[in-house]
Amino acid sequence: MTGDSVSTSSLTTLIMPPTLRWEGDPWTGSLILLDQTRLPGEVATCRIDTVTDLVEAIRSLRVRGAPAIGVSAGYGVVLGMRAASDPNDLSSVHAAMTDAVERLAVSRPTAVNLVWALRRVRERVESLVVHQTRAQTQTILARDLIQQAWLEAVAIHQDDMAMCLAIGRHGADWIDARFGNPRPPCPRLEIITHCNAGALATSDHGTALAVVYETHRRGRDLAVLADETRPLLQGARLTAWELSRRGIPVTVIGDGMAAALMSRGRGRLVIVGADRIAANGDVANKIGTYALAIVARRHGLPFVVAAPSSTFDLTLTDGSSIPIEQRDPAELIWMGGKRIVPEGVAVENPAFDVTPAELIDAIVTERGVIEPVKAATVQALIA
Ligand SMILES: CSC[C@@H](O)[C@@H](O)C(=O)COP(=O)(O)O
């Protein structure tokens, strides 16, 4: 893995660089990731050429956010196929694909977009292999197989951008219907969000933040309160960075502050993203989301989730069986290179929690809005 870096201070007027992109052709090109572990201090990219490097990048959150993990994993399969023991042999490339899919699938357990994208690439490659076997003539070369995998990865990438834009439109329609005329003297809409469900978590635009961007584009006066999101500070480091770069007023608050602010009339709406949504509408998202949903209900604020259909896992009847990633306790024990938890004290670090459907007022998808949130309405839009 190699990379380039530049200090952000000289870049404040530049547009955000892409979260991820493919550079070059399918056979020799690379996946270029914006290294999110280095934001906001540095805008640095890393060049990914192997499955091993991509697994490391996903685990260490260089690339993160459910949709962005899925899109990069699609390209990761291409990298794996290219590294086959005999890149000119069909069965060797096929075996390398299976190996890449298996290794990438376990890189992070909660975001279902990862296995969704891997399945799309695998199915496209396998349908060609089956076709080839039936035809009994060698019409498909190993390099064609790699190209087909890459074309599917590109399609996933493009679909993700289109889904985010559609989520933005449906979410902004929902806000217009709920809060009325967006033009002044309409009071400022203060939106609370958690973690980062923005352009950095997707190919572009985001999910929760796509709604913010579209609502802002339509002329509504709005501002965002961004939870800092302990322990890795995606809210403070990433959401605040991307919103300020796009000219949206943003204020960072500590994770425990939302209830107190709401009790004093602050915040009119909560919008968050999702990593996996069960068939009944239970939502797994960054740890702290559940607490935010409870305090939003207590104070009468609508609690909205924004996610593409690729985030739904209809094989799970409810959220109790969503796998929750347990991350290294060191993320909590250390801060800025200093130990903040005494030696010998136990630490737990679940990265996600599950918000029950009953606390969610609406789920905005690229297909429309699920409201009320329950098994029947999820089924009607997503199945
Ligand atoms: C559109 S992103 C939705 C979620 O993936 C996001 O809210 C989130 O929880 C990200 O967690 P992360 O651990 O940073 O990958």
Image (spheres, rainbow, N blue to C red):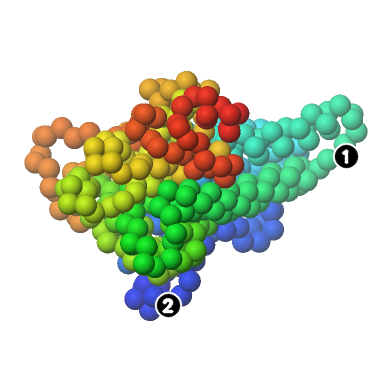
Q: Position of residue 143 (x, y in %)?
A: 76, 47
Please give the name of the residue rendered at 37% of the width and 72% of the height, measured from the top-left corner: 8
Within-10-Å neighbours for mark 1: few <14, some 14–19, many 20+: few
Left or right side of 263 for 174: right
Q: Position of residue 118 (x, y in %)?
A: 59, 37
Look at label 2 and name its amino acid: Thr
Residue sitting nearer the eye, 5 or 233: 233
Whether residue 253 is visible here, answered yes or no, is yes
Query: Which residue was labeled with disc 2?
Result: 13
Quadrant of image for the C terminus: top right
Residue sitting nearer the eye, 342 or 151: 151
Left or right side of 333 for 46: right
Please give the name of the residue rendered at 58% of the width and 32% of the height, measured from the top-left corner: 382
Counting labels gives 2
Marks 1 and 2, the one that precedes in the sequence: 2
Please give the name of the residue rendered at 58% of the width and 29% of the height, measured from the top-left corner: 380
Vertical position of residue 356 compared to residue 364: above or below: above
Residue sitting nearer the eye, 298 or 194: 298
Left or right side of 215 for 185: left
Residue sitting nearer the eye, 332 or 18: 18
Q: Position of residue 115 (x, y in %)?
A: 54, 34
Vertical position of residue 130 compared to residue 64: above or below: above
Whether residue 54 is visible here, answered yes or no, is no
Look at label 1 and name its amino acid: Thr
Query: Which residue was labeled with disc 1?
Result: 139
